Image (spheres, grey):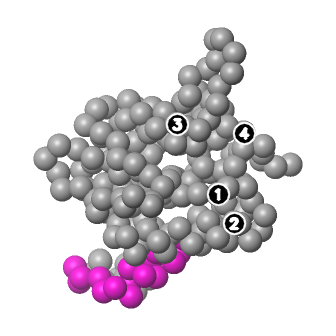
Amino acid sequence: MSSKFPAVHMVLTGACGSGQAAVAEHLSRLTGMAVADADTFHPATARRKIATGQNLCSADLTGQLHRMRDWIADRAVSGTSTIVICPPLSRASRDLLREAEGVAALTGQDATRLVFIELVTPGKAGPAPLEADEYGTSVDASGHPEDVAELVLDTVARMRSVRLVGTGSPSISDRLIAQAREAAEQ
């Protein structure tokens, strides 16, 4: 049985110390969305280099990005919502991850789009800014991770144009949580 709502795929980026892991943990707790850290997608050769203090080359990073893209695409095809935690990404890296949208489209999935959320904190160098044609936004991450997670949900819900009808409707974040949980249960 498929959900009536398309899966949500968030890529949380930010400088070291911007709280991505804590925010992703709260988002997952609220929504049931699957979470993955970019570091888990390094190929074995890259993990060996990291363990011995060597610098990674572009081929190591490309392999990591391909694995991330494929993980997102697999979940998009199955209708499972995801959160991926990443360091700051270049435009080329974001474009490669966006290829997951095309995989899902080929299988007839509805409007699968990656939403890039840049967690920004004062005094820390931020990720490469999103360009005007990219789907995503920046979110102030200087608050408590639970509050930042709520802000991320509200922001993504507004971006996805979630419509609420009637009086006493749940908040936008409550609606997005319900949609993500429904998709996760499928």
Question: Marks 1 and 4, Cα distance to the nearest angstrom?
Answer: 16 Å
The chief SS type of the magenta part is helix
Give residue 13's quadrant in the image: bottom left
Question: Marks 2 and 1, Cα distance to the nearest angstrom?
Answer: 7 Å
Please report the residue visible at 64 percent of the width from the left and 57 percent of the height from the top: 112
Asked if residue 48 lies left or right of residue 121, the reply is right
At numbered mark 3, what does the secondary structure look like: helix, strand or loop? helix
- Label 1 crowd bin: few (<14), some (14–19), many (20+), radius 10 Å: many
Whole-percent x, y for residue 60 in the image: 38, 84
Is residue 53 placed above or below 152 in the rendered structure? below
Q: In the rendered structure, which amino acid carries the disc numbered 1?
A: Thr
Whole-percent x, y for residue 75 in the image: 66, 61
Q: Are marks 2 and 1 in contact (CB under 8 Å)?
A: yes
At numbered mark 1, what does the secondary structure look like: helix, strand or loop? loop
Please report the residue visible at 73 percent of the width from the left and 55 percent of the height from the top: 110
Label located before the other in sequence (3 or 4): 3
Asked if the magenta segment contains residue 90, the reply would be no
Task: Name the residue that disc number 3 marks.
Answer: 158
Q: In the rendered structure, which amino acid carries the disc numbered 4?
A: Glu
Whole-percent x, y for residue 186 in the image: 77, 47
Asked if residue 56 lies left or right of residue 91, the reply is left
- Label 2 crowd bin: few (<14), some (14–19), many (20+), radius 10 Å: many
Label located before the other in sequence (3 or 1): 1
Query: Magenta residues?
Result: 53-69
Q: Are marks 3 and 4 in contact (CB under 8 Å)?
A: no
Label located before the other in sequence (2 or 1): 2
Label located before the other in sequence (3 or 2): 2
**Mark linked to residue 104:** 2
Task: Name the residue that disc number 1 marks.
Answer: 112
At numbered mark 4, what does the secondary structure look like: helix, strand or loop? helix
